[in-house]
Amino acid sequence: MLYRTMLDADLDLILPCFDQPSVDTTTRDRFLAYQRKGSYRPAWTWLAVTGDELSGLAVWWGFPTGDRPLALDFLWAAPSITDPIPMWAGLIGQVPPPAGYHIFTIPSNRDDPAIALRLAAAAAAGLTTLNERFRYEWTPSTPLPPRSTRLSFRPAPDEAFVDAFEQISFGSLDIATREGTARQGARAQAEEDVDDYRRMPGPRDQWRLAYDNAGTLIGCALPSANDGGPVVGYLGVLPSHRGHGYAADLLAEITWMLAESGATSIRADTDSTNTPMVTTFDGAGYRRFALRLVASHPATT
Ligand SMILES: CC(C)(COP(=O)(O)OP(=O)(O)OC[C@H]1O[C@@H](n2cnc3c(N)ncnc32)[C@H](O)[C@@H]1OP(=O)(O)O)[C@@H](O)C(=O)NCCC(=O)NCCS
């Protein structure tokens, strides 16, 4: 068996893979659309081939302006493969860390054997950290949360957001932040995060730093969007100001800004273990509608 990236001539071989039922959510239409805009690419689409036969497929996602794939979206194995784990592990291992495998599901399907098989392959490839993220949605059928009267919100240059992200990363319960700061340090992680948020399709001019009435910096609020529409993006409170409920003020501001821009759905994810954020989403009228499982390399890699 040989692992190689996609050639243009492989398209007819690959497309039927998306027509079979899968716990992965990439469709034929999404594959073609994302290839056109550059978030899927031939160089990020890995095939396992045996002679002329396609044995397996791994489709990775990255930013259209990015230079590396970041998230595995789709795994497929030919029906003739009785145990796909070694082949999938080999496919996943072609992309160097840091990388994650994102599986979108609902809590009642969490223990689906098809998911267990994929997570076993990810673990065999070194993606042994499993992060369960709650997916939330706000829609206009829920009243907007009260807007803050104790914080004011101001735009700022990227450098100021990097400074804020760096401070906020200390003591963060967010698994990706903890992994990133352990791997490359708080400053580099903050720079990478701000760079990633800049690559998202949400308008940059809505990013805000939040100050209390004395003019002290409290935190930041970044409304944003991804390919599916408006998202909360990011919010954080500086460590010395935690425990005063400011997270709710920041989430309310993001929700108001997106709603005033016409959003009819605002989505957000947070780690199930990030208890203050889970409480904040619940309290702001966000509905938990799904689960995202993220398998990634451990922090020490
Ligand atoms: C998550 C976060 C925004 C919460 O902000 P906050 O304004 O302190 O939230 P709350 O005041 O509502 O906190 C609720 C409780 O959680 C505790 N808490 C808040 N952040 C905590 C943290 N990082 N670690 C441990 N406990 C924390 C508070 O002390 C408070 O406890 P209490 O009710 O016993 O006093 C803040 O911790 C943060 O900036 N974390 C890093 C960035 C992050 O995770 N952002 C969310 C990404 S989706």
Image: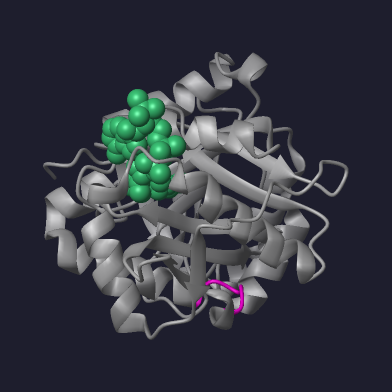
Coloration mode:
one colour
**Could you say which quadrant of the image residue 32 lies in?**
bottom right
Answer whether residue 202 is magenta in the image. Answer: yes
Residue at image coords 53%, 59%: 233
The quadrant of the picture showing ligand 1 is: top left
Give the left or right position of residue 180, taking residue 43 as reference. left
How many numbered circles are shown?
A: 0
- Drawn side of residue 266 relative to residue 185, left or right: right
Q: Is residue 67 above or below residue 301?
A: below
Q: Is residue 281 visible?
A: yes
| Spot occupied by residue 59 in the image (x, y as percentages of width and height) | 52, 54
The N terminus: image quadrant: top left
Magenta span dominant secondary structure: loop
Residue pushed farthest bottom?
A: 157
Is residue 223 placed above or below 115 in the rendered structure?
below
x%, y% of residue 276?
43, 33
Residue 35 lies in what quarter of the image? bottom right
| 4 vs 135, nearest the viewer | 135
Residue at the spot 35% in from the left edge and 37% down from the top edge: 243
Extreme-right residue of the structure: 141
Q: How far across and how far down the image is residue 156, in percent? A: 41, 82
Q: Nearer the viewer, residue 106 or 172?
A: 172
- Give the extent of the magenta segment: 199-203
Residue at image coords 64%, 68%: 34
Quick check: 295 above or below 145? above
State the residue at coordinates (46%, 28%).
272
Check the picture and name the quadrant holding the C terminus: top left
* Percent position of residue 27, x then y: 73, 50
Does residue 298 belong to the magenta stretch? no
